[in-house]
Image (tube, grey):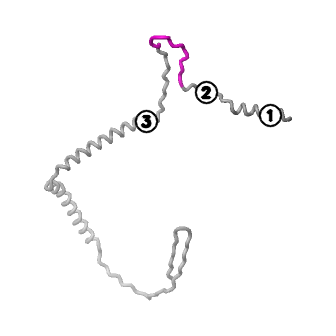
Amino acid sequence: MSESEAAAAAKKILEDACRSEPPVRHFPTSFRDETELPAYGPTPPVPQDDRRLVPAWAAGIAVASIGVGAGVTGIGCGAWLVLQGLASVTLDGVLMVTLPFAGAAMVATAIGGAISKARSAVSKTYYEGPVVQNTQINNTSNQRGMFSRTRNDVR
């Protein structure tokens, strides 16, 4: 290839690379009405198809979010009512409300204590046989990374 042919090929490659062409669209993303507008007066309406499809998962999420919002609102209203009631409570009222719970806890503690006393058996065990005392200690240590482990085996 001569120098003039190489220069022509390079020029063609640069022109192709620098050429700004609009991208090829495979499907329309919007509707553009190309009809001429009237010189004065209102513009006549143009019919546009509405074919929006909502996926099932999106509809499900929308319904679930409405349900969660309603549930949280109900819980909030209930908490508000309870807290409004607790704000006007006196000490005598609190003691009267908690008295049955304290009594039930006391009875449960007494029953549990009686059952544990009844279950504990008195037994004396006499051990017979020679006594051996080992004083050898086998010390193994594994140290890897951040954690280490030392194991002492008495034999």
Q: Mainly helix, strand or loop, the magenta region?
A: loop
Dot 2 crowding, Cα within 10 Å, few <14, some 14–19, many 20+ = few
Q: Of the residues under marks 3 and 2, which one precedes in the sequence?
A: 2
| Residue denoted by label 2 | 25
Q: Position of residue 38 (x, y in %)?
A: 50, 11
Direction from residue 67 to residue 43 in the image, left or right: right
Q: Of the residues under marks 1 and 3, which one precedes in the sequence?
A: 1
The image's mark for residue 60 is 3
Quick one: 90 or 10, which is closer to the camera? 10
Give above or below for 4 relative to 145: above
Q: Position of residue 44 (x, y in %)?
A: 47, 13
Q: CA distance from mark 2 to mark 1?
A: 34 Å
Provide the residue span drawn in magenta: 30-43
| Residue denoted by label 1 | 7
Mark 2 or 1, closer to the camera: 1
Dot 3 crowding, Cα within 10 Å, few <14, some 14–19, many 20+ = few
